[in-house]
C-alpha cells in the first residue's frame, strides 16, 4: 500500500482542495479502513458555504468502508470486512465509556471535525466504533448508517409510540431517515 493518499479539505467558503497526506498507521486497538463511500452531510455544506468555520481536518463522517489493516489487540474485525464507521472516537476506558454513555467522554473526538474524516482514501479509528455491514446491503445504503442512527435516537428521545403522528420539517438526509424511522 502507498504511504500517501489523497484527502479533501475545505479551505474556506467555496474552496475545496485535494491534497496528498500520509496514510494513517493503526495503533493498538485501531483499525485502518479504506473508504468505500462517504455521504455529504448538511454540516459539510455549512462549512463549504461559510456558515460554520471549516474544520482543520479532512471532513466527512457518513462512512462505509472496508477494513484494510488492524493494529495490535484488534479481535473483532479483519482485513476485508465491510463496516460502517461511527462519527465518534472515544477513550473506551473512562466511566462514561464503560457505562455506554460514551458521548459524554471527555476525550471524545469527532470524525471529520476534530479527527480526519472520510473525504479521504483511508482513515484510522477504534474497533469499538465500527459496525459490520450485512451481506446484501450496498455501500451506498451503508453510508446512511450514521444519519439513520441520528433519526432513530431522536425518535427514541421523543418517546414516539405506534400510531402517533409526527411532523418532519425538511427533506434532507436526516429528514428522510426520520420519516423512514418513524
Image (spheres, rainbow, N blue to C red):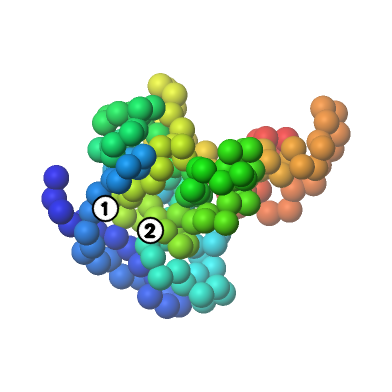
Q: In this view of the protein, which residue sits in the foreground, 140 or 56?
A: 56
Q: Quadrant of residue 138?
A: top left
Q: Is residue 26 left or right of residue 116?
A: left
Instruction: First in sequence, mark 1 or 2: give its number.
Output: 1
Quadrant housing the C terminus: top right
Residue 1 is marked as none
Q: Secondary structure at mark 1?
A: loop
Residue at which label 2 appears: 116
Residue 96, given in percent of the width and then of the height, sits at 62, 45
**In what quadrant of the picture does the N terminus appear?**
top left
| Mark 1 in CB contact with mark 2 (< 8 angstroms) | yes
Above or below, 43 against 178 in this view is below
Residue 49 can be seen, yes or no: no
Q: Secondary structure at mark 2?
A: loop
Q: Position of residue 119 (x, y in %)?
A: 36, 56
**Image x and y of residue 79, in percent:** 26, 31
Amino acid at each position: 500500500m502507498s504511504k500517501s493518499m489523497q484527502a479533501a479539505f475545505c479551505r474556506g467558503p467555496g474552496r475545496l482542495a485535494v491534497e496528498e497526506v500520509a496514510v494513517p498507521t493503526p495503533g493498538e486497538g485501531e483499525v485502518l479502513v479504506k473508504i468505500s463511500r462517504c455521504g455529504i452531510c448538511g454540516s459539510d455544506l455549512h462549512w463549504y458555504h461559510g456558515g460554520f468555520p471549516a474544520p482543520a481536518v479532512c471532513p466527512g463522517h457518513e462512512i462505509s468502508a472496508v477494513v484494510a489493516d488492524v493494529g495490535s489487540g484488534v479481535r473483532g474485525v479483519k482485513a476485508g470486512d465491510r463496516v460502517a464507521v461511527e462519527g465518534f472516537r472515544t477513550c473506551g476506558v473512562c466511566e462514561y465509556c464503560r457505562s455506554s454513555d460514551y458521548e459524554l467522554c471527555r476525550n471524545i473526538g469527532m470524525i471529520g471535525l476534530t479527527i480526519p474524516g472520510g473525504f479521504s482514501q483511508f482513515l484510522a479509528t477504534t474497533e469499538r466504533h465500527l459496525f459490520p455491514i450485512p451481506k446484501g446491503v450496498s455501500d451506498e445504503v451503508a453510508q446512511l448508517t450514521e444519519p439513520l442512527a441520528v433519526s432513530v435516537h431522536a425518535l427514541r428521545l421523543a418517546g414516539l409510540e405506534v400510531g402517533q403522528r409526527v411532523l418532519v420539517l425538511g427533506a434532507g438526509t436526516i429528514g428522510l431517515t426520520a420519516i423512514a424511522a418513524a
